[in-house]
Structure formats: structure tokens, C-alpha cells
Amino acid sequence: MSIADAGTEALREHVAAQLRRARDRSVVLTDAVDDDDLVRQHSKLMSPLVWDLAHIGNQEELWLVRDVGGHEPVREDIDNLYDAFQHPRADRPALPLLNPAEARGYVREVRDKVFDVLERSPLEGRRLETGGFAFGMIVQHEQQHDETMLATHQLRSGAPVLHSPAPPPGRALPAAEVLVPAGPFTMGTSIEAWALDNERPAHDVHVDAFFIDTAPVTNAAWAYRVKADLTAPRFWVRDGTGFLRNRFGHVEPLAPDEPVVHVCFHEALAYATWAGRRLPTEAEWEKAARFDPSTGRSRRFPWGDEDPGVEQANLGQRHLSPAPVGAYPAGASPLGVHQLIGDVWEWVDTDFHGYPGFEAFPYREYSEVFFGGDYKMLRGGSFGTDPAACRSTFRNWDHPIRRQIFAGFRCARDAGPEELA
Ligand SMILES: [Fe+2]
């Protein structure tokens, strides 16, 4: 069931719980290091952690305190500093940013006002408030920055500060690939209350028959390829003739049956080509994830319409790595494709465009200004993605050279006529 169907008070409680959960995670990620590490730039690709924190508060102030709540600004003077379009990441450390204590105080002050706004919002009427959309957008924004901060942690040097239990063990899958039948399916959504503009509207897409791997490409498969001439993924560390990996400061043996992570789009494409295969398109990925051949309907998630639980997917930073292949049998799609949600973002071979009938909401800068740029799509979320910011319709995009994100891939291939009998 979608949260929009649950009644206004249930929705209000849901929003409050999601806001708290996002903030708990932001606190874990920023309290784990000292002030020096908070203001330092750990990579030119990333903001200082303290920028992300105050930016989270600033977006929350803009949308929920000022717009939804109609209140006076809390800190209008810092809007420019925390506008991502004004300052590229590399320039942010030189800005006169709030220091860690000020940033923490600021996000707390904003949040207190937001709980007040939430109490008064009818959660209907205005489109921005209907179904709690603006609150959902801000929850997802904070969770997305939490994943970005997690990527900054992976780039940070020094002793490990983040720890987690290992993911559940893997299991052999019954097949290495499955056939996705030809025909139309419903891509995107018009009914998911917190879906962002680029996931809308729902529309029919015809997809030719194709085969898709039941699991993402593993470390073992990649290591085999590295012996020839492919580059090791980022954060692999040469150890004699083999490799170790650095995972948030823990240097350890590669887990052979875990999905490979920290590869860029070009590397994923090169691997697939070498293997005599290709990457799926975005429509193919979504059909494999959502299409139920018994009803012809597209599901919210591979396993059905219920939100992700711990049995279905490796999401939400519960584990600080992808889970081995076969670890989530309860999360498989009707066609038998595993681990589409969680573990690693999956590169797909599609550029970023709006769906037919796209309408920018609530502002062009969310998605539209990125259409047609130098981006490839990523689908399904990673171990570092929160369930609130992940669905089978969710679309992420990044530059095809990026490797610091928690991205892997799976392969696909065309189905020949002789295979369709
Ligand atoms: Fe942002």
C-alpha cells in the first residue's frame, strides 16, 4: 500500500517518522568524525561534510518552513552559500560556511519549525502538500545527501569510524539469466505520492524480448577480467598478484560473490562488451524489475507493492557493503531476477530525458535542467540508499566517468528468434 492511501493522521505520523529517521542517519554520519574531518574536503568530487549538513537544513527551510509553512526565513543570508547551482563542489571548502556547531544548531532550529508546519499542514489541497509531497521530497533529499556523505566517508583516509554487521550469506541461483518476454509494460508512475517529477507520468513502453542476468556482475567475475587488461574498480588495493579492497577504512579480502561496486559506466560497458553481452536499457531494467507476466501489471517493487523490508533488499546502510549474490531470495521479481533493489546502483545504457508528458515539478532544477546532458542512468539503489529514496521507478543519473558512487551493473543480451520458441 502506498502511504497516500492511509489517512491524514497516519500520513502525518509516517512523515514525522521518516523525517526523524533521515535525521538520525545524518547525525550518525556527521558525529562519526571530528570537526576537522567535517570541514575538510576529502575529495574534489565531494563537498565537506559540514556543507552537506547545512545544505540539508537550508533546502528544508526553503521548501517546508518558507514555502509550505509560509514563515519568515530563519537564515536568508546563507541561501547562496548552500545553493548547489551557485558553487561547484570543489569550491565549497573556501566558502564562509557555518562551522560544525553552527550547522548543527541551524538544522535543529529548522527541524523544530518543520514539526510545527507538519502539525498544521492539511496534507492536501495544494499540489505541493498533497500526500505530503513536499515533506517526502525533503526526506528523500536528506537521505540522498546521506548517501553522498557515505560516499565521502568511503573517500576519507584514516582509521575506520563506521561499522556494520555483515550482510546475509549468498546462495546459488537457479539460473544465470532469464528471458523477459516481448511486449508492452507500464513504465514510471502517476500514482506514487512521493515519486519525483522525472518518474512521471506512467506510460506504456514496448520492449523486445531480451535476456537479463539474474544477479549483478560480481567481484570474482571482474577480478577474472582484470587479469586481462581491465582496470581494477576504485578502492581495490593491489596485494601481490591479487587484490584487497578498502571498505570505509577496513582493508580486507575481496568477497568474490558480492556485486562489484565503484565502477564507472564506461568500465561496465567495456566489461559487458568483452563478455559478448551489453548493458540493459533503462526500460529493460524497469520491466525486469516490475513486470508481472501473470497479471500484466507493473509492481511498485520486484516482490510486490509492499515497502522494502530487511528480507527483501540490502538498503538503508544496515550493511556497509553489497550482499553476496542470492542473499535476498524474497526480493526476486516475478521473472526470477534478484537484487534489483539495493546492493549496488546499476548503470543502464540510457541517457537522461523526461518521459512523454513530463512536467517539471516543483521546479526545473530538480530534473529538467539535467536532461540531455552528459549523464547515464542508474537504477535500483545501493546498500547506502534509504528505502524512502528508492523504488522501482526511481531514476538516478550521474556522469559516466564517476566511480566514487556505489555503482555496479548487470548484463543483458538480445533474445534470438530461435530462443523464443
Ligand atoms: Fe541537495
Image (tube, rainbow, N blue to C red):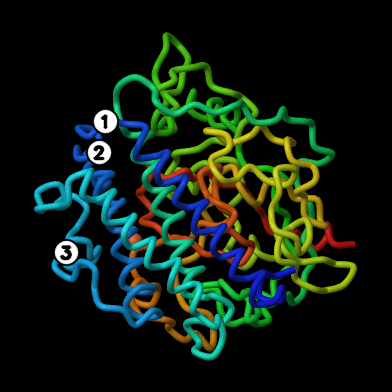
Tag shown at residue 34: 1
The CA span between labels 3 and 2 is: 18 Å
Q: Height in image: 207 above or below 356?
A: above
- Quick one: label 1 or label 3, which is nearer the N terminus? 1
Q: CA distance from mark 1 to mark 3?
A: 23 Å
Q: Amino acid at mark 1?
A: Asp
**Residue drawn at the location 33% of the way across and 63% of the way down:** 110
Query: Relative to 184, does residue 219 appear above or below in the rendering?
Result: above
Nearest to the observer: residue 20 or residue 248: 20
Q: As shown in the figure, which amino acid type bears the numbered disc 3?
A: Ile
Q: Residue at x 49, y 26 (%)?
A: 163
Callout 3 secondary element: helix
Q: Position of residue 287 (x, y in %)?
A: 70, 65
Judging by the rendered image, the residue that carries numbered circle 2 is: 38
Q: Are marks 1 and 2 in contact (CB under 8 Å)?
A: yes
Asked whether 107 or 245 is in front, the reply is 107
How busy is the neighbourhood of tag 1: few (under 14 within 10 Å), some, or many (20 plus)? few
> Which mark sits nearer the N-terminus, 3 or 2?
2
Q: Is residue 365 left or right of residue 293?
A: left
Circles 1 and 3: CB atoms closer than 8 Å: no
Q: Which mark is residue 10?
A: none
Give x and y (percent) for residue 34: 26, 30
Residue at 45% over, 23% down: 245
Report the quarter where the C terminus lies: bottom right
Q: What is the number of the mark on residue 78? A: 3
Q: Residue at x 80, y 73 (%)?
A: 297
Question: Which x, y percent locates residue 246?
Answer: 42, 24
Q: Is residue 358 visible?
A: yes
Residue furthest top as drawn: 240
